[in-house]
Amino acid sequence: MTEVKFAQRMAGLGTETAFEVLAKARELERHGKSVVHLEIGEPDFDTPEHIKDAAVKALRDGYTHYTPSAGLFEAREAIAQHLEATRKIPVHPDEVVVTPGSKPVMFFAILALVDPGDEVICPDPGYPIYESVARFVGATPRPLVLREERGFRVDPDELRRLITPKTKLLVLNTPHNPCGSVLTREDLTAVAEALQHSNAFVLSDEIYWQIMYEGNHYSIASVPGMKERTIILDGFSKAYAMTGWRLGFGVMPKDLAVRMTQLMVNSNSCAAAFTQIAGIAALRGPREPIERMVAEFRRRRDVIVSGLRAIDGVTCMMPAGAFYAFPNVNRVEPDSKRLADFLLAEGGVACLAGTAFGEHGRGYLRFSYANSVENIREGLQRLQAALLRYRARVS
């Protein structure tokens, strides 16, 4: 057989480790091993009924055809109104692009703005796809280190040192995956000041903004002068438990929206019509399902953080948003990949190594508490027992 010769750009494309760990865990389960799943970042709640009802009605009403590549006008209008109400900024429907999931927003933003040789500043630890796509287009990712002693929030002085004439894009994520940290209004003002003498755009990943436990969400787009250079990434997967619906959106300056729509034309054509109608129902429907989900996540957060802190050698910051705990396990094992592999194979607990989110995740693990309190408590018991065995093995 002829060997496949792949394009060189494929060598720099990374992956999302959560899906790899999930596959390994499922294979272990297939062979009879019991696994507590604390690896995957997906709400374990069902999509609210009013959203499903809207989708069913849309299908029966004939929303089964192509839509404009930027999205149905009524969907973009609903998103614009939602952004005005929640971010306190004026938004026109022409500044909105609807996508099949929110990942295309980050992919298209980097494709549209970043040339080979440019630099993209990415949080580290941070969602790995930012760096992966930057490398894919030939750019140089520059890690913006988020340190535990700062609550895993941006250090504006460190950001200033990273900015060069080659800086094309800064990626922010608040609430943050994997650390659970939240940027304050003061943080975002300081970031904006650090950027004022550069031409860099900001990709503001706000997919978890409705899952917060303390304080309020602020978008850097609401800082004076920043809306014109910000792409807001948001979607329906997390807050509305719609991961499988594949519906997201970006909000950006109109000229960039035109370019991102071109990328939609060349890739996905459009998001599914009936899911866009369901998205309108999500935005305009009752908030009680979200509030119930966040209250349950808060309960789970308190259980898992308390349990992690009770384990000898483990410390854990209290997450302010999202649904991840990011404990420090340096005193147990700095090689968190080795430890995570052991916990899955020997302890029956699926989690992610901090290094799945960058080199500065070394010595940390990420646990998703998108699971029941009963399963979280079982996972904590298994974790404690497995760590005792691990210590005995390496001592």
Image: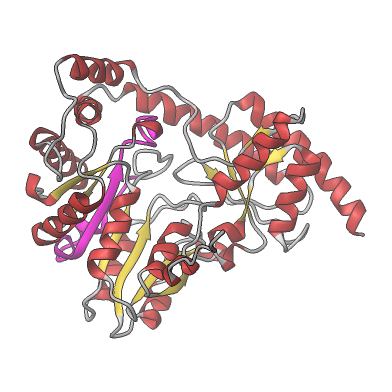
Image-quadrant location for residue 138? bottom left
Q: How is the image coloured?
A: secondary structure
With 389 as the anchor, is 321 left or right in this view?
left
* Residue name at image x 43 percent, y 68 percent: 7
Task: Report the front residue among 213 and 129.
Answer: 129
Judge whether residue 346 is colored magenta.
Answer: no
Residue nearest the viewer, comparing 221 with 344: 344
The residues colored magenta run 216-243
Rendered view: 310 above or below 361: above
Left or right: where 266 falls relative to 101: left
Q: Residue at x 43, y 31 (%)?
A: 294
**Residue 381 position within the rendered picture, expressed as x and y whole percent measured from the top left:** 77, 34
Which residue appears at 32% of the width and 36% of the height?
236
Single out the residue that lies furthest toward the bottom.
Answer: 165
Q: Residue most toward the front?
A: 1
Place of residue 288 in the rendered image (x, y in percent of width and height, measured from the top left): 33, 22
Residue drawn at x 43%, y 77% is: 158
* Quadrant that contains the C terminus: bottom right
The part of the image, by quadrant, that contains residue 47 is: top left
Asked if one can make out residue 50 in the rendered structure from this viewpoint, the answer is: yes
Position in image of residue 310 (x %, y %): 74, 43
239 magenta-colored: yes
Q: Which quadrant, please, contains the N terminus?
A: bottom right
Left or right for 269, reference 254: right
223 shown above or below 304: below
